[in-house]
Image: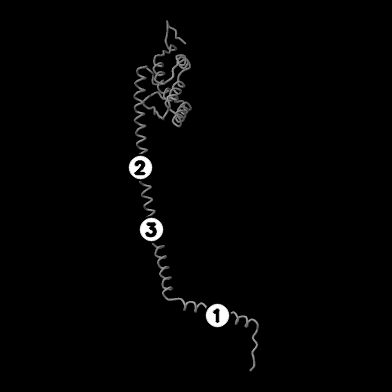
Amino acid sequence: MKIMAYPKSVRDRLVALEARVQRTEALLGQLLETPMIAIFQKFQDLDERVKKLGKSVNEIPSFIEGRMVSLAEDLGILTDAVDMKLEAVNVEISVLKRATEKRCQVARVSDSKKVSMASMFLVGDAKLRWRSHVSDDVAANRGKIETWKFVDVDIRDMSEEDKLFNFMAGMQGWDQTELRRQGVKDLPLALATADSLVDFSGIEVRGSKIK
């Protein structure tokens, strides 16, 4: 019998094919040796995992909706709290305006003086807006506002020391000197003392004005 000689490339392919057949036979043998119940159990486990994954995906929209509802409720509570705070501030401003107006009437303070005194009640951004408004008026040659009812007094929490300091800062030099001379230590006493002070600069004596 004549033995055929194959080229080297063909021999290599035959060897690789034989090795692949051997591996396939080994895997088939393992599969045949594995009980069918074990294979069925593996498919069941895989099916359960797929179902759980699908359930988790379906729950995502409900979770997002729940979070949105919770955030909306929190926003509503925050809005109500801000509204209550603004209402309290508006009441405080109204009370202060009435008290200041009454005090100015008793002291016979002119409207222009009232406007100049308003800045002592302002702090922070409110005082900055006030100064900016006054600067704009001066730049436009409008002068100062002379109608007290249009003054928007913005009140912030202030300590008694800050109130006294702002009150003193808005007074004339001779008023400050007199209050310091009398040892004024709080705002109520400073207001009472300031009401009792008399500015002689505008009083005429025998046809001449005291300066």
Picture disc at residue 77 = 2
**Tag 2 secondary structure:** helix
As drawn, is 80 to the left or to the right of 177?
A: left
Asked if the residue under mark 2 is in contact with the one under mark 3, i.e. CB atoms within 8 Å, the reply is no
Residue 38 at x, y percent in the picture: 43, 73
Name the residue type under label 3.
Answer: Glu
Residue annotated with mark 1: 22
Name the residue type under label 1.
Answer: Gln
**Sequence order check, earlier mark of 2 and 1:** 1
Q: Callout 3: few (<14), some (14-19), or many (20+) C-alpha neighbours within 10 Å? A: few
Residue 122 at x, y percent in the picture: 43, 28
Q: Callout 2: few (<14), some (14-19), or many (20+) C-alpha neighbours within 10 Å? A: few
Picture disc at residue 59 = 3
Residue 150 at x, y percent in the picture: 38, 27
**Tag 1 secondary structure:** helix
Q: Residue at 38% of width from left, 24% of height from top?
A: 148
Q: Residue at 44% of width from left, 76% of height from top?
A: 35
Residue closest to the eye, 118 or 87: 87
Q: Residue at 40% of width from left, 22% of height from top?
A: 114
Q: Nearer the viewer, mark 1 or mark 3?
A: 1
Q: Residue at 41% of width from left, 71% of height from top?
A: 41
